[in-house]
Image (cartoon, rainbow, N blue to C red):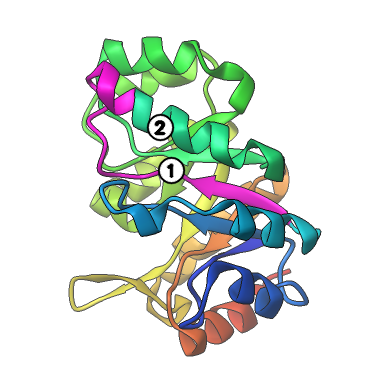
Amino acid sequence: MKISAPSFVIPDSRANNVKYLKPLVHEVELLFFDSRHDFDMPANGEIAELAALNMDYSIHLPTDADLNTTDGWQVIDSYIDKLQSLKPLRMVIHPAESAFFLNEMDKRRKHNIIIENTDFYGSFFDDAADMGFGLCFDNPHAGDKARDFLDRYKSHIREYHLQGEADGKHHKSLEHIEPNLLESILANAKIYGATVCLEVFRQDDFLKSLEIIRKHT
């Protein structure tokens, strides 16, 4: 099991977050959410700076593209092409739960894109798993079906987006996660060699979560 953290733990650039996180985690999840704004696409200088830091990366692809359309996939492809020089271990995508989406994923298998659960409503993830795609498990996204999702797809999960939830808000420290669920997630991550990303966006929440994780490893 490897530990990861997102590239926005401290209020600074992605590169400076990597510098801060490098002594503390095995990987950094580089976050890209808003493709509609030019600032989200990294410049060549930022790519070079990230590459020079000699860190293992995963990529969170933008969430605002309509992946039931060819245009939406062109947006995703622009990020894939731009970030290939970083040799990411995997890329995480929020799905459109459709046959069109899975067909487009099938065309891009070489990029090791894994599918994050944005909900858990039916047969889509069965189809994705049957096609051999890796999954990313975000515990609050699964809501009260988190255990069902974990039990059903644990052998397909390559990365966990682990976080607490308090007052209806996600991305809180692991002080706010049900202990038995945390133990199950970590046990399965160890068995199947998955990465656990502490997906919190405040330094204090990250440090508290890291301390909790270390007590379990």
Q: Nearer the viewer, residue 110 or 204?
A: 110
Instruction: Residue under label 1, please give it.
Output: 61
Q: Verify whether residue 46 appears in magenta.
A: no
Vertical side of 7 occupied by 9: above or below: below
Residue 22: quarter of image: bottom right
Q: Residues within 10 Å of mark 1 (few under 14, many from 20)?
A: many
- The number of callouts visible is 2
Vertical side of 24 occupied by 123: above or below: above
Q: Nearer the viewer, residue 112 or 19?
A: 19
Q: Earlier in the sequence, mark 1 or mark 2?
A: 1
Give the magenta range.
Answer: 56-73
Residue 202 shows in this picture? yes
Task: Identify the residue at image location x=70%, y=40%.
Answer: 85
Marks 1/2 in contact by CB < 8 Å: the verdict is yes
Amino acid carrying label 1: it is Leu
Quadrant holding the C terminus: bottom right
Vertical side of 23 occupied by 100: above or below: above
Q: Residues within 10 Å of mark 2 (few under 14, many from 20)?
A: many
Q: Nearer the viewer, residue 179 or 102?
A: 102
Percent of width and height locating residue 137: 45, 46
Q: Provide the secondary structure element on which disc 2 rests.
A: helix
Q: Nearer the viewer, residue 151 or 27?
A: 27
Instruction: Residue under label 2, please give it.
Output: 76
